[in-house]
Image: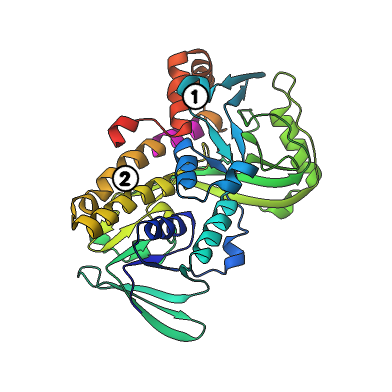
Amino acid sequence: MRTQVGIVGAGPAGLLLSHLLHLRGIDSVVLESRARDQIESTIRAGVLEQGTMDLLTDAGVGARMKAEGALHHGFELAFEGKRRRIDLTGLTGHSITVYAQHEVIKDLVAARVADGGKLRFGVSQTSIHDIETDKPSIRYHHEGEAYELQCDFVIGCDGSQGVSRASIPPALRRDFERVYPFGWFGILCEGPPSSDELIYARHERGFALVSTRSPNVQRMYFQCDPKDSVENWSDDRIWAELHARVDSHDGQKIIDGKIFQKNIVGMRSFVSNTMQHGRLFLAGDAAHIVPPTGAKGMNLAVADVRVLTEALNAFYVENRTDLLDGYSATALKRIWRAEHFSYWMTSMMHRIDGASPFDQQLQVAELEYVTTSRAAATAMAENYVGVAGAQAQA
Ligand code: DHB
């Protein structure tokens, strides 16, 4: 089999790239190791930046997001018994939408299927070959048969554990990593929203986040030991912990509901500064990971894909390679901005074991500053909605 662009991984990056290329008349095949129902049900984050919303809308896959997602114009920071609002729209002119990542995946899969796109689920033994030539290929097994997909380009969208990044010789890679000594315990529960807007709470017991999914389903998180197990947490214990961390702030009270999903995620920051080798390009989690605070992960994947689409289009339409050659440098500007923001927000909001009383006061001082200085609040807001450094990235 032959295609123009071979895409490894059907997460947001791979599916969106395949869809955007299709809109430009460029052919692609997406190979995914998991089953379709698995990718459509894996619970991940749920905040879409303004630019992500606009891109999905312009690409014709934003209708359900618009109908079912919740448009938010601000969020709250709770600390030291106070709650203070960051007015995203007032400060930046932009907003965000709370819409779960797996819903974006469903919309993209549906669009690809409707357009006759080539998606292969449940593939195994995937390997990438000849990326240093102009005829790279991907070998894989599907339903018991071995295949070779010949392409002009291979795009690795297969996450941080995938084969793509590992296909770049280690000597040519430059990786950066920071691991945090805590994780997030996430729940989904039935019930009404506890708040009109998201609440990020700093508490001496640890961070907590009140988010939402729909008028009847709520998403909440609290900082935990990444090695802890969901079995150790009864519903009662979870609610006691969330109440302790969120309710103390200025009359706020979260509303309990029936918990139907629990998970623990570890937290790390990672960047592969080498996002291209020969005809292989990395996008999304295959190239970078952020801790969840601030919800940049999927938005970064979408931003990579936007840059790649333009670069591939310039190659096919005008025979230009300059945008492809500049892909890493272009994408890395936004990536490092988001890496810093996620790290900064994480560091300001979490309980850090062993932190001195002085360090704890620094966190509070930072929160006081971002919630009282218009300049500092604007800096936070423009990072949150995803327009920070927009001129530099243009
Ligand atoms: C959600 C996740 C985040 O990491 C965040 O910063 C805000 C919201 C969420 O899953 O709703």
Amino acid type of the residue tagged 1 in the rendering: Asp
Q: Position of residue 318 (x, y in %)?
A: 20, 55
- In this rendering, is residue 146 above or below 190? below
- In this rendering, is residue 282 above or below 369? below
Q: Position of residue 226 (x, y in %)?
A: 58, 48
Q: Quadrant of the C terminus?
A: top left
Considering the numbered disc 2 on the image, is that residue within a helix, a strand or a loop? helix
Q: Is residue 203 visible?
A: yes
> Which residue is most to the bottom?
145
Residue 338 lies left or right of residue 227; in this view the side is left
Q: Is residue 226 visible?
A: no
Please name the residue that numbered disc 1 is placed on.
359
Of residues 93 and 272, the one nearer the viewer is 93
Write the start and end of the magenta stretch as one range. Answer: 339-347
Is-magenta flag for residue 134? Answer: no
Q: Closer to us: mark 2 or mark 1?
A: 2
Is-magenta flag for residue 342? Answer: yes
Q: Quadrant of the N terminus?
A: bottom left
Query: Which numbered dot is residue 331?
Result: 2
Of residues 359 and 265, the one nearer the viewer is 265
